[in-house]
Amino acid sequence: MEGKEVSFSKIKWITIVLTIFGVYISFRFVLPLIIPFIVAYLLAWIIRPPTEFLYRRLKISRVIGGTISLAVLIAVAGTGIFCLINLLFNQTVIFLKNVPIYLGLLAEKIDAICEGCDKIFGLAYGTVRDIVDEYINHFMVHIKSNVMPGLTGKTLSIAITVIGAIGIILIVFVSTLLILKDLPYFKEKYKDHKFYKEVRKTTDKLADAGIAYLRCQLFIAVAVAIICVIGLVLIKNEYSLLLGIGIAIFDAFPILGSGIIFIPWSIIYLLNGNIYAAAILITTYLLCQVVREVLEPRLIGNHIGIRPIFTLMAMYVGVKLFEIPGFFLGPIGLIMIITIINVINERYEECRVQKDSESV
């Protein structure tokens, strides 16, 4: 019996190592090749209900019904995205116009801080300011000599990337319609296949956990963004939409959250005597925290049980391995690893119980 436990422990660790390695290989080499078709499958999953309705009730073919449903989805989503981008663009333009004013205010603050440092450390007037100016000049020279030429040289590659992106979008749309058309055929053909049943069991649990996580994060991000925008509107901030969305994105980071922005900001208002604005910002921060603490367990439930520290670790490892996309791939990969290991362990336990019962 002890030998069986040791064997099971070895199999468990081998399973964990192989699963982690498999997920890494999939993300590194396979995902870039199939990501358009994953997006196409998600789109097909979204528009499948209206497509099936048109097929069953009105006898419209799945290709035509899928085209209609996809066109409606693109029109609705495109209109919303266009309005959002238009508002963000307007606020960005206003911000850029006001940059000289903000730079003037920042220069005054820097002068005051530098003068205070000179007095504290007993230095000659302007010593700290000269040091700061030297670092700023070095930074500007670095931008002009390294960053700007790189941006200019990449203009052609950016144009090629845009053209390639248009081609990928067309592939995604065509693949979506083909998946809608052939999905019933594949399900009917392979539904009784043993391998299909095993894979389907795993993919169902992966989809259940992954969709629960993504849906939770998206819903919370939208709710936090709305709360932030309302709070910034109440203090009459002219960049309420731009800042609200930015803070909502930052709030997705575990541990840090929106407090790292709202708390110092409210303290500055409080020191300046603006108690109303400070109270609004603190209230906004508390509402964001309540929304996250209440919605996360309700939306995710028992699908995945990942502590915030492990999510943060997954993000860090993901960024180290895959750069910016790793911010999203890290937590998704962690969910995949946990789900696959649980499914394999459940399957192994079933086989072990079955063998024990047969031996008895």
Image (spheres, helix red, strand yellow):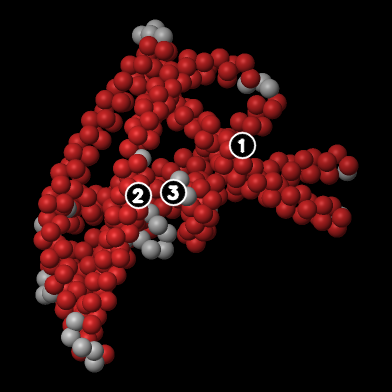
Snapshot quadrant of residue 115: bottom left
Image position, residue 262 (x, y; %): 26, 64
Closer to the camera, 278 or 243?
243
Image position, residue 355 (x, y; %): 83, 41
Q: Residue 324: which disc?
A: 3
- Above or below — where is 103 with respect to 213? below
Q: Given the current orientation, which residue lies at the most extreme right position?
A: 359
Q: Residue at x 65, y 46 (%)?
A: 21
- What residue did someone put label 2 on? 220
93 sits left or right of 353 in the view: left
Pointer 2 with pointer 1, Cβ within 8 A:
no
- Above or below — where is 265 with respect to 27? below
Q: Check disc 3 and report its element: helix, strand or loop.
A: loop
- Above or below — where is 137 with respect to 29? below
- What residue did someone put label 1 on? 202
Q: Check disc 1 and report its element: helix, strand or loop.
A: helix
Image position, residue 231 (x, y; %): 19, 57
Closer to the camera, 161 or 147?
147
Image position, residue 65 (x, y; %): 37, 14
The amino acid type, in three-letter code, at marker 1 is Thr
Mark 3 surroundings: few (<14), some (14-19) or many (≥20) residues within 10 A:
few
Q: Residue at x 51, y 54 (%)?
A: 320
Q: Residue at x 20, y 44 (%)?
A: 88
Q: Is residue 290 in sight in this rendering?
A: no
Closer to the camera, 158 or 256?
158
Considering the image in quadrants, where does the N terminus appear?
Answer: bottom right
